[in-house]
Image: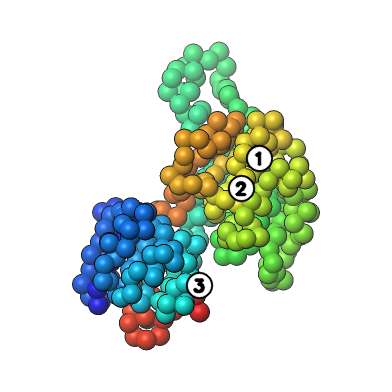
Amino acid sequence: MKIVVLDGFTLNPGDLNWDGIKQFGELTVHDRTGFAPENVIKTIGDADVIFTNKTPLPKAVLENVPSVKYIGVLATGYNIVDTAAAKELGIIVTNIPTYGTAAVAQFTFALLLELCHHVGAHSDAVKKGDWTNSVDFCFWNYPLIELAGKNMGFIGFGRIGQATAKVAQALGLNVLAYDSYQNPALVSDTCKYVSFDELLANSDIISLHCPLTESTNGIINKNTISKMKDGVMIINTSRGPLLVEQDLCDALNSGKVAAAAVDVVSAEPILATNPLLKAKNCLITPHIAWAPKESRVRLMNIAVDNLAAYANGKPVNVVNL
């Protein structure tokens, strides 16, 4: 079995190993592969199995790599693969569910707490001498926000949304959840399902935890923002295109949205023209919510298990059945 990893550096920049996958055949790992279809086709060559993180595999590529029978996506989201074309061609596509649940929940609150306290900026101010030179025993350069008693709205309430909601409840937040699937067992005094419009109208913080689909693409836009509370905070650790970035920028600059924090953007790496780079009160991090080593170890282990299941004729985590 010939196995090719198209863009291994993101998952394994050197602190993990590929031994688990190597046991299944002849393995070639590329740190990066250019996104141009001809580059991808050449890199795949006559491989039987390919792994990709963010290297796109459209129909035009898949039709020109007839040896490929299995694609392992090294992430939960798999929109980079034309799964319908893969199914037509008899290629099994799998993804990696659940590996980053704890990491993304933790990072969501890292972003939210930074919006509330501006820890980094205050530390920098102290190191510049502002506290040393202060006539008062303390100072703050930004409004400080207490979360207890506020409403945190979750657009998408799957595994990651639920894990994040547990942290929210521990901090005294009330959880408002919007999801097409509702689990009555999760409803409590501090957690309830609401309609989309109710969530928009009543949330002090809105956090995105839904997949990118035709119906969620651009779900945060000037129309939905207009229905939100003045001074709302918005967090996106899911997928960049869930937000219409120019609309969010305008709302931040007008003050309608008090602050935002995004770990994902519409085009990654971020383009110099992205409007959020010039928006007021906007934190942007480089798609790292998923990336603690512990999380990446889980991802690698699941990728190995997926390949083992495929090799044994009983594939799991298949996304194009």
Element marked by disc 1 = helix
Q: Amino acid at mark 2?
A: Leu
Q: Residue at x 25, y 77 (%)?
A: 1
Mark 3 lies on residue: 84
Disc 3 packing (10 Å; few <14; some 14–19; many ≥20): some
Tell me: 11 left or right of 131.
left
Disc 2 packing (10 Å; few <14; some 14–19; many ≥20): many
Give the quadrant of residue 38.
bottom left
Along the viewing direction, whichever of 248 and 233 lies nearer the viewer: 248
Across and down, in percent, residue 105 comes to: 53, 55
Element marked by disc 3 = helix
Tell me: 67 left or right of 90.
left
Tags 2 and 1 touching, CB below 8 Å = yes
Q: Of the residues under marks 2 and 3, which one precedes in the sequence?
A: 3
Element marked by disc 2 = loop
Tell me: 236 left or right of 71.
right
Q: Residue at x 49, y 18 (%)?
A: 130
Q: Is residue 245 above or below residue 83?
A: above
Mark 2 lies on residue: 243
Across and down, in percent, residue 65 comes to: 33, 70
Across and down, in percent, residue 23 comes to: 23, 75
Q: Amino acid at mark 1?
A: Asp
Q: Residue at x 46, y 77 (%)?
A: 88
Mark 1 lies on residue: 247
Tags 1 and 3 touching, CB below 8 Å = no
Q: Is residue 265 above or below residue 211?
A: above
